[in-house]
Image (spheres, grey):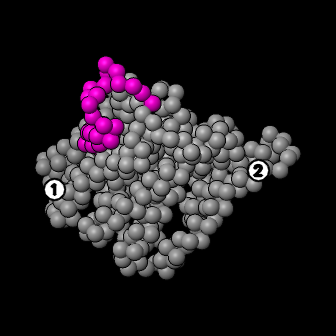
Amino acid sequence: METPTTETAVTANHPNPSHSPLVEVLWLFLRLGFTAFGGPAAHIAMMREEVVRKRQWVSSERFVDLIGITNLIPGPSSTELAIYLGYLRAGWLGLLVAGVCFIGPAMLIVLALAWVYVTYGALPQIGWLFYGIQPVVVTIIAQAIWNLGRTVFKGKLSVGLAILVLVCYFLGVNVLILLFGGAALYGLLRLLITRWHKKPPVTSLVVPLLGANLQAIFEPLGSFMRTGAAAPISLGLVFLTFLKLGSVVYGSGYTLLAFLRIDLVQNLHWLTDKQLLDAVSIGQFTPGPVFTTATFIGYVIGGWPAALLATLAMFLPSFVLIALIHPVASRFRQATWTATLLDGVNAAALALMVGVLVQLGQHALMDVLTWAITLLTLVVLLRFKLNSVWLILAGAVIGVLRFWIFGG
């Protein structure tokens, strides 16, 4: 097992040479936790600026390799990158401190906003805010899907798989089956197309089998969808639901939407589509991981105990997976079968995001003004590359002005 190292000597760019590596990790990721707006791509860019250019903790090449490794495992990629960097800089304590400091500020902010939402959400003014915010969020998700698609779709095969997954999603096929089944199907077709006559490695079956086992474990969560009844809210079920989400969701917080909607809106009936959109809006508005949407949802359905438990369950797999993957990271990153299955997972995940986008759009785009907000947001995003926080603030202002001027 590789021993964590600082990978650097103190240089002129190092602002506090007297600080221990653990203190450096604490202050850096605590600051990022309060200031890292803009989603995973922005988070990664900020981390690169800090740990490669300013502090020289790792080389640029090593940083890119870490990104690749975190993209191969489920969970929030930018959070896992923070956890990994903390481990490399300050060992096991660094792993814990980096993750907690990056997640903690966002969790506290979201918890405060959730309290306001639950306490005052019935007031008309709160509805005005989300009237303007939700179309902006739909557009931000659409742009993210478009940008991801340019990377994910590497040929006709991945496009065809995405279309098949999208159709199956609208037909009601389970999301886990679509995600892991899509990966297995893509891998099999790639093998056939490239005329690989030898048997695939046994390890190529690991991800599909894992998906099947997870499906068996969490199948009781779907029983409520078949009965149409709302599941009774218990802390144990909250923990299990979000632990599953943190264990199987690949990529960005947008991929999480598909799983949230299936589990919390359709299966358990704990949320409405409007509440899910509100939760995503809060996640976009706050710094740090988008996965802190779990904090907001937890508070809405069960108060602060459920909020804290949902947050713990959502992020716990990331800590565990980074600790487990580090000893074999280099070999895992270079394995051909892993790269092939990941391509299938990414294509399936993107299709699920499209399906959720269509369904959320039906609730957010309700009149001419909301459609206009969406189109204007799209133009601004494409032309000026403005931070999403400012767009969400602008949407909130438009919503308030609309009801202030014209009334309900």
Q: Does 348 appear in magenta?
A: no
Which amino acid type is shown beneath numbered disc 2? Pro
Residue position for label 1:
125
Mark toward the start of the polypeptide (2 vs 1): 1
At which x and y percent is residue 89? 40, 38
CA neighbours of label 2 inside 10 A, class few (<14), some (14 to 19), many (20+): few
**Marks 2 and 1: which is nearer the front?**
2
Residue located farthest toward the top when viewing the structure as drawn: 12
Which amino acid type is shown beneath numbered disc 1? Gln
The span picked out in magenta is 7-36
User: Is residue 259 or residue 361 the one in the foreground?
Assistant: 259
Secondary structure under badge 1? helix
Determine if residue 19 is in view.
Answer: yes
For image coordinates 64% across by 56% down, the residue present is 207
CA neighbours of label 1 inside 10 A, class few (<14), some (14 to 19), many (20+): some
Residues at marks 2 and 1, CA–CA distance in whole angstroms: 58 Å
Q: Does 15 appear in magenta?
A: yes
User: Is residue 48 or residue 16 the one in the foreground?
Assistant: 16
For image coordinates 20% across by 53% down, the residue present is 128
Relative horizontal placement of residue 34, taking residue 403 as reference (left or right): right
At which x and y percent is residue 246? 46, 58
Residue position for label 2:
201
Secondary structure under badge 2? loop
Q: Quadrant of the C terminus?
A: bottom left
